[in-house]
Image (tube, helix red, strand yellow):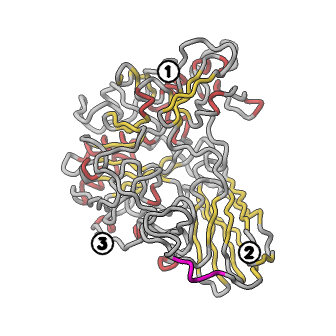
């Protein structure tokens, strides 16, 4: 452990910030040394989102308004494929991925000001550039975290859709929009063997691997599409592909392992590598690690994560890896310590015995509103470990569900508009990775006359128009196989209408695997 005097890390180097391919120059401190590395925004991080507006007025949804066709083999602008990873283009030019590139231009707060104590987690704390391990201090983003990985052997017959990573809503930057994703073709026995080997790879951490039931939408989880071919995505040829998410800020990534006929151990190695990318690991030259570059492993058998610093694979003279994190654990940007990187983000393996809590701060129980009021719902979620998620359900006086909406962006504020006169039950709910579910319910009343003009429907918006478009809330895109949120009947899903973060509709799954009868293996 380095024991030299701590300096303000933000004063060590000037920083250029890449946002959307544009370099923004700036200085991280007056005493910065010339030639410091640039930084690039982590695509999985959404800093301080605005309140989510939920429109509950009875206006029709423009059909397919939120869907956008993409070229079969075209990644979104600013992203490039490097072997089995998809990274921001700027990383190939030497930029270090940070959660919030703008914040990396300011001085890093020390432990006394609520910032990280790098000496507790880094072997080389003074080598870490600004913006690394600052984390997201909103609820759910704390470290250490618990996490769930879902191995999807069932495919998605209705297809995934391109967009910001969201495993619960079948959205992925690598998706080929609307293209049916095929069922795994390796058979039940091989699927079970591969799943067990993947679970063994993560046995040191509180990262559970499941494959029988899809987690509920409220729970942040990584989804691995097992099977298919690279042509079923926008990726180029590879054995598997995944977004590189340094420090796993997204928590809801989707990755792909194009494995069907290979031996189960090889399939497990590929699956674990793609999961590793979504959790912040790049390729290395360690032949005994699942993060070894390429899929013709130089060492056979079931591999695991490397427990020493190993050289990363260079791309155009730069490491396409989480270079800032690597400096923390290895002192240099071009070496990666798999085990320590994962151990910094995820809690050690163990049982989570503490349920989360959730309080609806507003509105007050029994509060009365007028029909034109905007009703602000504020959440106060908590748990002793990170990785949990929460959402809101609304039912009318008869108990009919009207909305089930997850707070995917962790805004902690929903603004309800268009709620017609009546009495409503508002239920906030929260779930952690130990499947503890806690709720807080209140009742509100809306008075007055509903002045909604029912004639203003499709004439104001046509297909392909995003402005004001409404879409279903909780139960769309992935149909019954999503494993709906706790306590919600299947026929109650998809009642809410949301003006942001739109999702695909919910046709029923046409394909069911015999895997539905598989036994769950506990890691």
Q: Which residue is mark 1?
A: 330
Q: Would you place residue 77 above or below residue 357 in this image?
A: above
Secondary structure mostly seen in magenta is: loop
Q: Quadrant of the N terminus?
A: top right
Foreground residue among 82 and 499: 499
Q: In the structure shown, which secondary structural element does the residue marked by tag 1 occupy?
A: helix
Q: Which mark is residue 510?
A: 3
Picture residue at 64% right of the left edge, 14% below the top:
32
Q: Nearer the viewer, mark 2 or mark 1?
A: 2
Q: Give the residue at x 50% y 63%.
A: 216
Observer-side mark, 3 or 1, equals 3
Q: Position of residue 311 (x, y in %)?
A: 38, 21
Rounded to the nearest whole Å, what is the CA distance between mark 2 and mark 3? 42 Å
* x, y percent for residue 99: 57, 37
Q: Quadrant of residue 270?
A: top left
- Residue 7 in magenta? no
Q: Are marks 2 and 1 in contact (CB under 8 Å)?
A: no
Q: Find numbered disc 2 in the image and state the secondary structure of the residue it sits on.
A: loop
Measured in 3D between alpha carbons, the distance from the residue under mark 3 to the one under mark 1, in whole angstroms, is 49 Å
Residue that protrudes farthest toward the left in the picture? 261
Magenta part of the protein: which range? 452-457
The circle drawn on residue 55 is none
Q: Where 274 falls versus 494 (above or below)?
A: above
Verify CB contact (< 8 Å) between mark 2 and mark 3.
Answer: no
- Picture quarter containing residue 515? bottom left
Q: Earlier in the sequence, mark 3 or mark 1?
A: 1
Query: Residues under labels 2 and 1: Cα distance?
Result: 58 Å
- Which residue corresponds to mark 2? 372
């Amino acid at each position: 452990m380095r024991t030299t005097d701590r300096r303000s890390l933000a004063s060590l180097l000037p920083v250029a910030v890449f946002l959307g391919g544009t370099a923004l120059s700036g200085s991280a401190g007056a005493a910065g040394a010339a030639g410091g590395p640039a930084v690039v925004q982590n695509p999985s991080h959404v800093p301080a989102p605005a309140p989510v507006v939920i429109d509950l007025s009875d206006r029709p949804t423009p059909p397919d308004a939120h869907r956008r066709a993409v070229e079969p083999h075209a990644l979104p602008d600013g992203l490039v494929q490097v072997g089995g990873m998809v990274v921001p283009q700027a990383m190939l030019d030497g930029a270090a991925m940070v959660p919030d590139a703008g914040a990396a231009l300011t001085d890093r707060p020390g432990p006394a000001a609520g910032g990280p104590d790098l000496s507790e987690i880094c072997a080389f704390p003074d080598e870490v550039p600004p913006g690394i391990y600052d984390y997201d201090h909103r609820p759910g983003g704390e470290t250490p975290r618990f996490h769930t990985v879902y191995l999807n052997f069932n495919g998605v017959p209705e297809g995934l859709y391109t967009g910001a990573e969201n495993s619960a809503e079948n959205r992925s930057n690598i998706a080929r929009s609307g293209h049916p994703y095929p069922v795994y073709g390796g058979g039940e026995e091989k699927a079970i063997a591969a799943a067990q080997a993947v679970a063994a790879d993560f046995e040191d951490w509180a990262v559970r691997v499941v494959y029988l039931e899809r987690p509920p939408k409220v729970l942040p989880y990584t989804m691995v599409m097992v099977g298919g071919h690279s042509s079923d995505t926008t990726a180029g040829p590879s054995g598997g592909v995944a977004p590189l998410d340094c420090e796993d800020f997204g928590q809801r990534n989707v990755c792909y392992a194009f494995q069907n006929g290979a031996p189960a151990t090889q399939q497990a190695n590929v699956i674990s590598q793609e999961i590793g990318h979504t959790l912040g690991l790049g390729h290395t030259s360690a032949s005994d690690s699942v993060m070894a570059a390429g899929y013709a492993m130089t060492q056979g058998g079931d591999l695991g994560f490397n427990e020493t610093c190993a050289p990363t694979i260079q791309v155009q003279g730069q490491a396409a890896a989480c270079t800032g994190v690597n400096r923390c654990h290895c002192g240099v940007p071009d070496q990666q310590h798999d085990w320590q990187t994962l151990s910094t983000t995820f809690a050690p393996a163990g049982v989570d015995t503490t349920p989360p809590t959730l309080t609806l701060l507003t509105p007050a129980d029994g509060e009365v509103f007028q029909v034109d009021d905007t009703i602000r719902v504020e959440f106060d979620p908590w748990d002793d470990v990170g990785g949990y998620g929460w959402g809101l359900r609304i039912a009318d006086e008869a108990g009919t569900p009207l909305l089930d909406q997850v707070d995917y962006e962790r805004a902690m504020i929903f603004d309800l508009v268009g709620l017609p006169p009546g009495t409503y039950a508002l239920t906030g709910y929260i779930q952690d990775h130990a499947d503890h579910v806690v709720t807080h319910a209140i009742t509100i009343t809306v008075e007055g006359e509903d002045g909604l003009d029912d004639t203003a429907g499709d004439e104001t918006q046509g297909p392909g128009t995003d402005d004001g478009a409404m879409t279903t809330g909780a139960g769309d895109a992935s149909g019954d196989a999503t494993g709906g949120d706790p306590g919600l009947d299947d026929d109650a899903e998809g009642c809410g209408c949301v003006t942001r973060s739109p999702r695909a509709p919910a046709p029923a799954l046409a394909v069911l695997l015999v895997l539905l009868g598989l036994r769950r293996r506990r890691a």
